[in-house]
Image: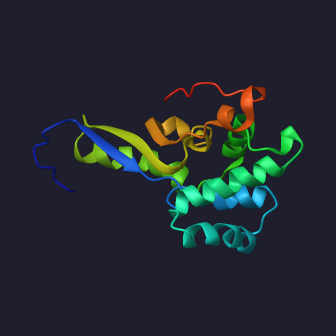
């Protein structure tokens, strides 16, 4: 059995990225959900990258522009859209079981240790907050899309509630 050195604290913080770590890339998945293929989406993003944009803001901008082109509010990327998208997003194989296994292994080594999980993402945190794994995280940080500024007061946007 593994022996533990004397811990300085009885708490371990495990910090995860979200996109391409726990779940497939959410921006690519959102684009596909909007009916934009990966190749077409990259063609839309490429001119912005050539103009000096960073990749993540360029991808967000293209999604927002696509959403603005849609005439029907139910087809736009709104808070409800992101919440439902998060609920349907499936983590990679083994991710849902991983949290319990990490806690179990840590307790086998140091019985009174607390293992806390945190999430930091360069993606849209509203999606992560509504996935089936969200309840494992003590806190989440990421990009908040100011939907009210994009769509005006016709779209509901509540303050996010940290887990």
Is 126 drawn above or below residue 49 in the view shown? above
* Res. 128 in view: yes
Farthest-out residue, left: 6
Q: Please name whichever residue, 151 or 142, is drawn nearer the observer in this view of the structure.
A: 151
* Res. 23 in view: no
What colour-coding does the image apply? rainbow
* Quarter of the figure with residue 153: top right
User: Does residue 48 appear to the left or right of 40 in the view shown?
Assistant: left
Residue 114 placed where, x, y %? 30, 35
Residue 23 placed where, x, y %? 57, 56
Q: How many marks?
A: 0
Q: Please name whichever residue, 123 or 87, is drawn nearer the observer in this view of the structure.
A: 123
Q: Please name whichever residue, 151 or 9, is drawn nearer the observer in this view of the structure.
A: 151
Residue 28 placed where, x, y %? 66, 62
User: Does residue 58 appear to the left or right of 32 in the view shown?
Assistant: left
* Quarter of the figure with residue 43: bottom right
Residue 151 placed where, x, y %? 74, 36
Farthest-out residue, front: 51
Residue drawn where x is 31% and y is 42% of the image: 13
Residue drawn where x is 54% and y is 58% of the image: 56
Residue drawn where x is 53% and y is 35% of the image: 135
Is 140 drawn above or below residue 156 in the view shown? below
The quadrant of the image that shows the N terminus is bottom left
């Amino acid at each position: 059995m593994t022996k533990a050195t004397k811990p300085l604290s009885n708490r371990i913080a495990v910090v995860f990225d979200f996109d391409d770590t726990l779940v497939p890339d959410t921006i690519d998945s959102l684009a596909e959900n909007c009916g934009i293929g990966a190749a077409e989406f990259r063609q839309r993003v490429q001119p912005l990258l050539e103009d000096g944009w960073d990749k993540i803001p360029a991808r967000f901008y293209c999604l927002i522009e696509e959403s603005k082109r849609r005439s029907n509010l139910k087809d736009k990327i709104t808070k409800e859209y992101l919440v439902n998208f998060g609920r349907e997003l499936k983590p990679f194989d083994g991710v849902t079981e991983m949290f319990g296994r990490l806690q179990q292994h840590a307790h086998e080594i140091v019985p009174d240790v607390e293992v806390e999980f945190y999430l930091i993402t360069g993606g849209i945190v509203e999606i992560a907050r509504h996935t089936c794994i969200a309840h494992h995280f003590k806190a989440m940080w990421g990009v908040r899309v100011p939907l009210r500024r994009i769509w005006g007061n016709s779209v509901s946007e509540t303050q996010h509630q940290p887990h």
